[in-house]
Amino acid sequence: MGEFELIAAIKGMADGLPANGFEGIGDDCAVLEIGNGEALVFTSDALCEGVHFLREAIPPRALGDKALAVNLSDVASMGVAPVAVLLSLSLPDDLHEGWVEELMAGFTTLAKQHEVALIGGDTTRSQSGVVLNITAIGRGAASHLKRRRDARVGDVVLVSDRLGASAAGLKEVLQGNYHAPLAAIHHHPVAEIEAGCWLGARKEVHAMMDLSDGLASDLKHILKASAVGAEVELTAIPVAEGATLREALTGGEDYKLLLTADAAHCTRLMANFESRFQRPLYPVGHITASKELHWLEKGVETVQEISGFCHF
């Protein structure tokens, strides 16, 4: 059973539980509308030593920053701003003195930057490495929420920045080059909070999510949720300096935004985005009615199989 099959199976097992007003499993965050046109969103993400990071490779301050950033990214991808987090730590006995203080310094510095409150959590002993689990909460206008299910046939598919730097950085880390520039990018992802909120307010943006598992995997989530297909032009993929096209497509952990937008208003959206953020949105393809994902190279369909990261 693969990762997404496992998620679907767990969702099926929980189908008999009450919804209690929540929109649950299926987007980057669960949603609870709270009245007066506002909604809360909730997400949870874990970082496990040996799976998401190597303790000897990443300074604890950077780990605290990254653990928070990847959760704030999920909130931003829904089109609203984060307001609070809960933090749970499972810690082994062999941490050096000051390790937790450094971890929390990185965590709280980023939290202060985005005015995010730490409102609770848990601590426990671990016999299998460091585990950090964060629940992030966002709040904003319910009308600004962007969901995976809202892509429409004819929409342009766009990404908010160049891709692949994190995957290239992971390669450096695994080769022991812990201080390489690309390794630093891998260890310090930037949540696109301001861009996510700005795009959330734009009616021409239909579906949106963040890129955590790679474009090849994450686009499929939008297509499945929206019951549509897509054609993506490989030569249009914006590849980060030092990365390869394969890393841009499949590497994951870029935490940029993936969105679909009304084709009739996409040129205006792109111009307004570039004026606001001093960088472009990159159109990479369009949504089709085929319910399949097709990869093109200079307009000609390729037969190669491209898949992003999967835990199982």
Image (spheres, rainbow, N blue to C red):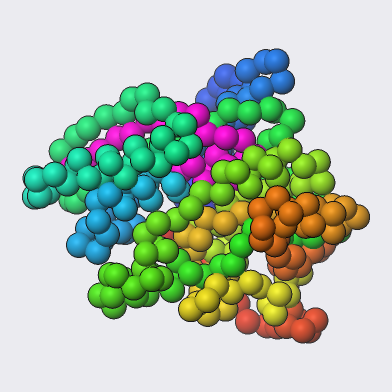
Viewed as shown, does residue 255 lie left or right of 280? left
Q: Residue 124, percent across and down? A: 19, 34
Taking the spot 77% from the left edge, 57% from the top edge, the residue there is 270
Can residue 50 be seen at all in this image of the molecule? no
Q: Residue 2, percent across and down? A: 47, 59
Q: Residue 263, percent across and down? A: 86, 57
Farthest top residue in view? 36
Can residue 209 be seen at all in this image of the molecule? yes
Please name whichever residue, 51 or 118, is drawn nearer the observer in this view of the structure: 118
Farthest right residue in view? 264
Please name whichever residue, 57 or 302, is drawn nearer the observer in this view of the structure: 57
Q: Residue 266, percent across and down? A: 83, 56
Range shown magenta: 71-92
Let me know if residue 115 is in the magenta part.
Answer: no
Taking the spot 57% from the left edge, 56% from the top edge, the residue there is 256
Taking the spot 22% from the left edge, 45% from the top edge, the residue there is 102
Q: Picture quarter containing residue 133?
A: top left
Let me know if residue 83 is in the magenta part.
Answer: yes
